[in-house]
């Protein structure tokens, strides 16, 4: 799904790269940071795409610049940066072949930066372009009201149909605090006129308790955990005390925070949506899921790859296999009735 979003937003990324690249002197160092890079097949995707775009810029202008490129790959310290670093030799070989002329390609350097993007990561005015894909819906923490021993969201792991409005409000407030902090930090680190391209889970409705299909995804996982409670495999107290530290904002909520702090101009903001099943490439919203069982398995694997550390840390590793087998079945039953999409928000910003 992340790869689909990156491909979908390629025109915006190209616009950002060209704007920054052409504004710099020929002998400059252009600095790009990818926040939430992960360590899978998408970890170096942005690097590869930017290198291609720079090559295209040189061909369009028929101009060979002496510019060098510095890429920073950021994620939490628990990210497997060694896996990323071990893939660099192969990546260098592939990019050299694709460029064709190694001497004409812009020199580039790749550095890992472990740390939370809710803290300062770079020196002031040192970065030209920030990119982040499917990371900013993660909050800095579970809201304190939900992590202090009070079970205010019983039977839910996020915002669901039975979630009290109070709980939905504290999730929204935590998002507002975190997103405002993120923007303030990045504004300090960006050069004047620097750009940011951000994609994260969102929702269509302004009503917080109408989280739509992304909310249903978490409700079905709650339902799967509840089935393990009934089997005696999970303690009810464990389920009631577990809340995912994420929030899917509406576009209006995102816009309000950006405009309130006044540090960025919104160049573009819009929605994008992809099927729950990352292997489903059909773009028709109303198309029928041809193989719900297979799609349920694909969704389950995708969500497990994201949530496994959180679930294992709270419930223990023993339930993982059983939980995601149940979840695959529950999702398949839902997809028998209708196809489901994950809405997202795309924001392209320029530092004021």
Image: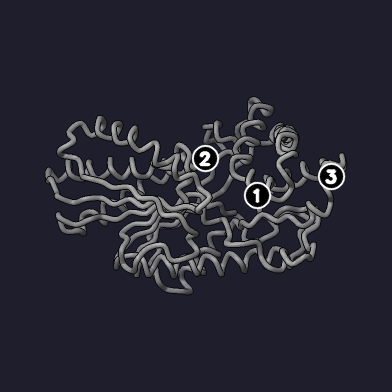
How far, Cα to Cα, is label 1 from label 3?
18 Å
Tag 1, which secondary structure? helix
Residue 220 image position (x, y, % from top left): 73, 43
Q: Earlier in the sequence, mark 2 or mark 3?
A: 2
Residue drawn where x is 67% and y is 29% of the image: 292
Tag 2, which secondary structure? loop
Tag 3, which secondary structure? helix
Give the number of the disc on residue 229. Answer: 3
Q: Is residue 23 above or below residue 111?
A: below
Question: Which image quadrant for residue 150?
Answer: bottom right
Give the number of the mark in front: 2 or 1.
1
How far, Cα to Cα, is label 2 from label 1?
20 Å
Q: Is residue 129 above or below residue 101?
A: below
Give the number of the disc on residue 310. Answer: 1
Q: Do the residues labelled 2 and 3 touch (CB within 8 Å)?
A: no
Question: Which image quadrant for residue 87?
Answer: top left
Residue under label 2, please give it: 1
Task: Name the quarter where the C terminus is drawn.
Answer: bottom left
């Amino acid at each position: 799904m992340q790869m689909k979003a990156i491909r979908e937003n390629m025109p915006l990324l190209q616009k950002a790269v060209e704007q920054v690249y052409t504004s710099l002197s020929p002998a400059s160092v252009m600095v790009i940071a990818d926040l939430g890079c992960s360590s899978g097949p998408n970890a170096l995707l942005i690097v590869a795409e930017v290198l291609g775009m720079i090559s295209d810029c040189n061909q369009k202008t028929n101009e060979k610049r002496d510019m060098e490129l510095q890429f920073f790959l950021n994620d939490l310290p628990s990210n497997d940066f060694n896996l990323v670093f071990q893939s660099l030799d192969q990546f260098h070989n592939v990019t050299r072949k694709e460029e064709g002329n190694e001497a004409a390609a812009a020199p580039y350097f790749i550095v890992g930066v472990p740390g939370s993007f809710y803290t300062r990561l770079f020196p002031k005015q040192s970065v030209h372009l920030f990119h982040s894909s499917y990371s900013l819906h993660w909050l800095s923490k579970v809201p304190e009201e939900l992590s202090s021993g009070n079970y205010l969201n019983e039977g839910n792991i996020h915002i669901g149909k039975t979630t009290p409005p109070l709980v939905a409000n504290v999730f929204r407030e935590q998002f507002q605090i975190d997103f405002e902090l993120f923007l303030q930090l990045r504004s300090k680190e960006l050069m004047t006129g620097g750009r940011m391209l951000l994609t994260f889970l969102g929702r269509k409705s302004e009503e917080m308790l109408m989280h739509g299909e992304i909310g249903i995804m978490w409700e079905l996982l709650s339902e799967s955990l509840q089935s393990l409670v009934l089997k005696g495999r999970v303690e009810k107290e464990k389920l009631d005390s577990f809340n995912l530290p994420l929030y899917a904002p509406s576009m209006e909520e995102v816009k309000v925070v950006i405009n309130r702090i006044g540090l960025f101009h919104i160049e573009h903001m819009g929605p994008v949506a992809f099927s729950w099943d990352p292997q489903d490439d059909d773009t028709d919203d109303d198309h029928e899921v041809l193989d719900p069982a297979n799609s349920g398995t694909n969704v389950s694997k995708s969500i497990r790859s994201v949530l496994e550390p959180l679930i294992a840390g709270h419930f223990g590793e023993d339930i993982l296999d059983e939980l995601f087998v149940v979840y695959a079945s529950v999702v398949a039953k839902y997809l028998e009735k209708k196809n489901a999409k994950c809405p997202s928000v795309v924001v392209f910003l320029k530092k004021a």
